[in-house]
Amino acid sequence: MTIRKEKQFDFNGKTLKAEELTAVQIDEWRTSLDAEKGVAPPLPDMLLNRSIPLSAVRLAVPDLTDADLGAAPSELAKIYDAVEEVNPFFLKMTENMATLGEALLNLDN
């Protein structure tokens, strides 16, 4: 049995829980990225400009609903803050992926 970090937080009038993603969940998320190629990022990702994308936030906060995503950006930030707090290794990985992607895009420049 694995013990994972978790954090409960208030959001939009209810209590949600952010959970630390397992290595298996992170790997499944990573391999699912190919399906997202060429798809515009969801609005919360564009508004908040965080390293952990909404697709991974949904994995970490299983009770998050589509209706929740209509909240004010300041409320949405609470979700991302909680997910980042309990997923520091995943956060670092996504930051490294972004840095590598930017470097690869700039190879020709």
Image (cartoon, rainbow, N blue to C red):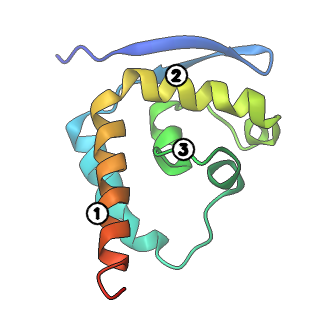
Tag 1: residue type?
Leu
The picture places residue 84, in percent across and down from the top left corner, at 45, 29
Residue at left 31%, top 69%?
103
User: How much space separates mark 3 and mark 2, taking CA atoms?
Assistant: 12 Å
CB within 8 Å, label 2 to label 1: no
Q: Using the rendered view, name the quadrant where residue 107 is placed.
A: bottom left
For the N terminus, the quadrant is top left
Q: Using the rendered view, name the quadrant where residue 105 is placed.
A: bottom left
Tag 2: residue type?
Ala
8 relative to 72, above or below: above
Q: Which mark is residue 82?
A: 2
Q: Which mark is residue 100?
A: 1
The picture places residue 83, in percent across and down from the top left corner, at 48, 28
Residue at left 71%, top 49%?
47
> Which type of secondary structure does the marked residue at label 1 adopt?
helix
Nearest to viewer (mark 3 / mark 2):
3
Query: Which residue occupies the foreground of this view, 25 or 48?
Result: 48
Tell which circle, 3 or 2, labels the residue nearer the N-terminal end: 3
Q: Which residue is mark 3?
A: 50
